């Protein structure tokens, strides 16, 4: 695969990685399992158990595991055609996916802020 195609794949594969990592670690649909994992990550007596459950609460940590899954499914490699390509591609995918998640978080905060400002202005106009 030529470098241009590898770069395109990098930015495209990072999208589902970011989506899966964000959904599991932030969205309401996984709230109860995430709360369970949060409790277990804080209360477990064993360090490996605490770390295992923590990975389901941290989008950065979880994105590494989603990336490993995506690498296994797609066999994506970056720059090299051997194990080094998997290694470089994996860390590049994690980085791009986390950039996407950071942008998404920033966008959501900005949208919430605009909604609050709009409600405040509506109250002023309506004389409340």
Image (cartoon, grey):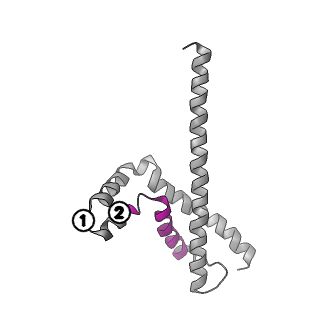
Image quadrant where one finds the C terminus: top right
Q: Magenta span has 70? A: yes
Q: Residue at x 56, y 49 (%)?
A: 105
Splitting the image into 4 quarters, where does residue 96 fall?
bottom right
Residue 127 at x, y = what percent?
58, 12
Pointer 1 local density, CA inside 10 Å: few below 14, some 14–19, many at least 20: few
Which residue, given by chain and number where applicable, does mark 1 sit on? 45
- For marks 1 and 2, give the CA distance: 12 Å
Q: What residue occupies the far bottom of the structure in this picture?
A: 82
Which residue, given by chain and number where applicable, does mark 2 sit on? 53
Q: Which residues are magenta?
A: 53-72
Q: Is residue 61 left or right of residue 101?
A: left
User: Can you say whether 33 is above or below 10 in the image?
Assistant: above
Residue 81 at x, y = what percent?
63, 85
Residue 114 at x, y = what percent?
61, 34
Q: Residue at x 64, y 78 (%)?
A: 78
Q: Secondary structure at mark 2?
A: helix
Q: Secondary structure at mark 1?
A: loop
Q: Residue at x 50, y 68 (%)?
A: 64
Pointer 2 local density, CA inside 10 Å: few below 14, some 14–19, many at least 20: some
Q: Is residue 6 left or right of residue 62?
A: right
Residue 20 at x, y = what percent?
50, 59
Q: Residue 96 has which mark?
A: none
Q: Name the magenta segment's main secondary structure.
A: helix
User: Can you say whether 53 is above or below 112 in the image?
Assistant: below
């Amino acid at each position: 695969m030529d470098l241009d195609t590898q770069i395109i794949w990098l930015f495209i594969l990072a999208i589902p990685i970011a989506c899966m990592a964000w959904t599991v670690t932030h969205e309401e649909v996984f709230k109860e399992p995430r709360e369970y994992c949060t409790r277990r990550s804080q209360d477990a007596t064993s360090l490996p158990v605490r770390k295992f459950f923590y990975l389901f609460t941290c989008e950065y940590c979880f994105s590494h595991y989603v990336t490993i899954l995506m690498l296994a499914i797609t066999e994506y490699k970056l720059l090299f055609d051997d194990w080094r390509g998997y290694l470089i591609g994996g860390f590049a995918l994690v980085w791009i996916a986390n950039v996407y998640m950071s942008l998404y978080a920033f966008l959501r905060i900005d949208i919430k802020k605009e909604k609050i400002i709009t409600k405040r202005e509506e109250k002023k106009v309506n004389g409340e």
